[in-house]
Image (cartoon, rainbow, N blue to C red):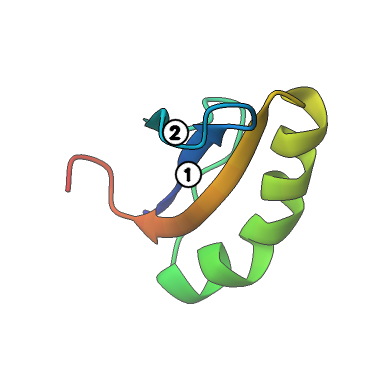
Amino acid sequence: MFELVLVICLALRPDQCAIERPPSVERFPTAMECTRNSYVHVVHWLMEHPAWNVRQWRCEQPGA
C-alpha cells in the first residue's frame, strides 16, 4: 500500500514547512496508482488549506 505525502509551506512564510499525510486520502495498492491519482487529492487539500502551498508531493509506503 502507498500513501500520499505532502511537503507544505506557509504561503506567507515559505521558510516554514512541514510534512503532511492527509488522513482523509485513501491508500493506494501500487505506487503507479498513487502517483496517477494523487493530484486530485493535492488540489483538494490546497482548496481546504488556503494559507499553505504544496512544495512537493510523493507517494510512499506507510512507515517508510
- Look at discs 2 and 1 and give the one toward the viewer: 1
Give the Cα separation between the discs numbered 2 and 1.
Answer: 6 Å
Secondary-structure class at tag 2: loop
Identify which amino acid the numbered label 2 is placed on: Arg
Q: Is residue 44 left or right of residue 8?
A: right
- The residue located at (41%, 28%) in the rendering is 16
> In terms of image quadrants, where is residue 19?
top left
The residue that label 2 is drawn on is 21
Q: Are marks 2 and 1 in contact (CB under 8 Å)?
A: yes
Q: Residues within 10 Å of mark 1 (few under 14, many from 20)?
A: many
- Can you name the residue that lies furthest to the left here? 64
Quick check: 49 above or below 5? above
Q: Earlier in the sequence, mark 2 or mark 1?
A: 1
The answer to which of 44 and 8 lies nearer the viewer is 8
- The residue located at (63%, 72%) in the rendering is 36
Q: Position of residue 30 (x, y in %)?
A: 43, 68
Q: Position of residue 49 (x, y in %)?
A: 72, 24
- The residue located at (51%, 37%) in the rendering is 14
Q: Which quarter of the figure is the N terminus placed in?
A: bottom left
The image shows a total of numbered marks equal to 2
Q: Is residue 36 left or right of residue 55?
A: right
The residue that label 1 is drawn on is 6
- The residue located at (45%, 60%) in the rendering is 29
Q: Residues within 10 Å of mark 2 (few under 14, many from 20)?
A: some
Identify which amino acid the numbered label 1 is placed on: Leu
